[in-house]
């Protein structure tokens, strides 16, 4: 096994936790919280998932950057969009930025004051982060064929 393959496995495991956790939240916990108008369901999930989820996100960033360099996509060619690999890495970086924007909004404005009245806005943030995670997973899968 090469070092790149090992890094890829770590990346895929971290993606499994990150995307899987958000899918679980979106599909199972969020509908129940909205139906019962109980923000505590979301807060309880957040408290349990945050440490593992954020560790997974950190691993995703580290291994993603490592692998982009392995593919020859260095910081100088980020947002270049010239070749298949550059397009995927650049798109994933844009999506990562959007994830950070959502996380900052959630952590600063909604989670500390989550109640039955602002749960719908929090739901949009949760669904957005989930869809971004799935989109990043799909984009990453295209690298095997040279990117998009």
Image (cartoon, grey):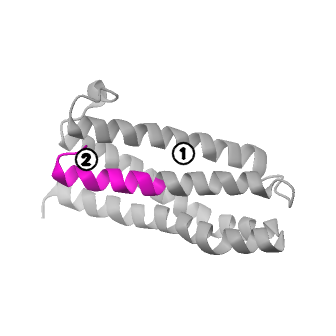
Give the residue at x 65% y 51%. 125
Q: Which mark, residue 67?
A: 2
SS at mark 1 in the image: helix
The part of the chain drawn in magenta is 133-148
Question: How far across and how far down the image is residue 83, in percent?
Answer: 20, 33
Image quadrant for the C terminus? top left
Residue 47 is situated, as x and y percent measured from the top left of the image, at 68, 66
Q: Nearer the viewer, residue 42 or 4?
A: 42
Q: Is residue 98 left or right of residue 64?
A: right
Relative vertical location of residue 44 with respect to residue 96 in this rendering, above or below: below
Q: Is residue 139 magenta?
A: yes
Residue 76 in picture, x, y percent from top left: 28, 24
**Tag 2, which secondary structure?**
helix
The residue at the point 82 percent across, 70 percent down is: 38
Give the vertical position of 71 relative to 5 (above or below). Answer: above
In the rendered view, does 12 fall on the left or right side of 116?
A: left
Which of the image's four quarters has the N terminus? Answer: bottom left
Task: Report the residue at 65% width, 42% height from top.
Answer: 104
């Amino acid at each position: 096994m090469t070092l790149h393959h090992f890094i890829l496995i770590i990346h895929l495991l971290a993606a499994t936790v990150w995307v899987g956790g958000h899918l679980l939240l979106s599909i199972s916990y969020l509908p129940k919280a909205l139906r019962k108008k109980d923000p505590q369901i979301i807060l309880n999930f957040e408290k349990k998932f945050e440490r593992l989820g954020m560790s997974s996100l950190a691993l995703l960033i580290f291994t993603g950057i490592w692998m982009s360099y392995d593919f020859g996509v260095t910081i100088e060619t980020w947002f270049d969009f010239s070749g298949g690999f550059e397009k995927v890495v650049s798109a994933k970086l844009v999506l990562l930025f959007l994830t950070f924007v959502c996380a900052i909004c959630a952590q600063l404005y909604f989670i500390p004051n989550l109640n039955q009245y602002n749960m719908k806005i929090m739901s949009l943030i949760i669904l957005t982060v989930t869809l971004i995670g799935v989109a990043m997973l799909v984009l990453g899968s295209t690298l095997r064929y040279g990117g998009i």
